[in-house]
Image (tube, rainbow, N blue to C red):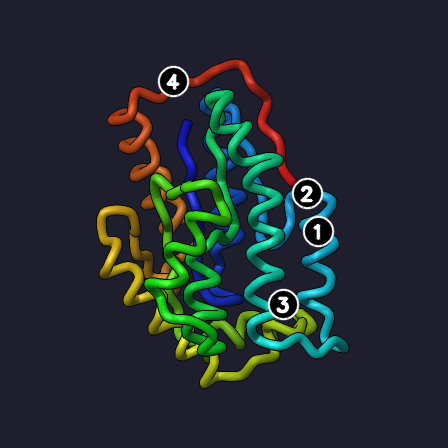
């Protein structure tokens, strides 16, 4: 039915908004599928463990290919079938993360090359809506510290890296303004959820989406 993605730097609060939206949609009777990136399938979860392992040295282009391999698998195995069944798919990250993190953060490839590559990887999937939760890198780091999270390999990249990622996300949001909704990540969790909920309900109403009897599922 609809493919809805959430983006933002680590510590932005996007995953919380994914969970809140999923709960709301299920309460309204919609059948949902939630997947995270990388992950969502057995193969993709194994790739995730490699990518986040702080003890592994992963070359930037290798990193891009591993993220994309995991995305190709979850797109074919779970996302496309769910959409064909009329479900709402919520993705905690999708290919915009690769453009921001590997494209800009690592400096691996230009955006135009990546956009064509993403379409090939996903079988021409394009999100119906992308919510970008925006916070500055220092705020995001402070949140990770407050949550006593151990930095994985990606999260240990440093402030300069995250500034490049943040700026790339902002450029994507401007370029694809019809798809992106930019959210101030310093607002309260409830306030952000209310904004997302209202926008998704508008999207569903405009698209003719109707609740069904599904129970929803997560990766």
- Above-or-below relation of 170 to 156: above
Q: Position of residue 112 (x, y in %)?
A: 33, 63
- Residue under label 1: 45
Of callouts 2 and 3, the N-terminal one: 2
Q: Residues within 10 Å of mark 4 (few under 14, many from 20)?
A: few
Q: Nearer the viewer, mark 2 or mark 4?
A: 2
Of callouts 2 and 4, the N-terminal one: 2
- Residue under label 2: 41
Report how far apart the C-alphas of labels 2 and 3 lie in the structure.
Answer: 27 Å
Q: Nearer the viewer, mark 1 or mark 3?
A: 1
Q: Nearer the viewer, mark 4 or mark 1?
A: 1
Q: Nearer the viewer, residue 203 or 187?
A: 203
- Residue under label 3: 147
Kindly identify the residue that appears in the image at 58 percent across and 59 percent down. Answer: 67
Q: Nearer the viewer, mark 4 or mark 3?
A: 4
Q: Nearer the viewer, residue 76 or 148?
A: 76
Check disc 2 and report its element: helix, strand or loop: loop
Q: Nearer the viewer, residue 18 or 27?
A: 18
């Amino acid at each position: 039915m609809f493919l809805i993605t959430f983006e933002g730097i680590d510590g932005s609060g996007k995953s919380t908004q994914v969970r809140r939206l999923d709960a709301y949609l299920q309460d309204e009777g919609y059948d949902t599928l939630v997947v995270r990136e990388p992950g969502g399938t057995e193969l993709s979860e194994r790739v995730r463990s490699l990518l986040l392992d702080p003890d592994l040295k992963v070359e930037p282009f290798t990193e891009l290919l591993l993220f994309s391999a995991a995305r190709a698998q979850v797109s074919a195995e779970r996302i496309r079938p769910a959409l064909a069944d009329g479900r709402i798919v919520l993705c905690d990250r999708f290919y915009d993360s690769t453009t921001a993190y590997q494209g800009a953060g690592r400096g691996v490839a230009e955006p135009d090359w990546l956009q064509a590559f993403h379409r090939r990887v996903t079988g021409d999937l394009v999100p119906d809506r992308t919510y970008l939760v925006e916070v500055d890198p220092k705020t995001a780091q402070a949140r990770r510290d407050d949550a006593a999270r151990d930095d994985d390999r990606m999260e240990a990249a440093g402030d300069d890296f995250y500034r490049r990622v943040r700026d790339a996300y902002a450029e994507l949001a401007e370029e694809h303004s019809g798809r992106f909704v930019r959210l101030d990540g310093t607002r309260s969790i409830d306030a952000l959820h209310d904004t997302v909920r209202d926008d998704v309900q508008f999207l569903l109403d405009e698209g003719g989406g109707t609740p069904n009897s599904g129970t929803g599922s997560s990766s």
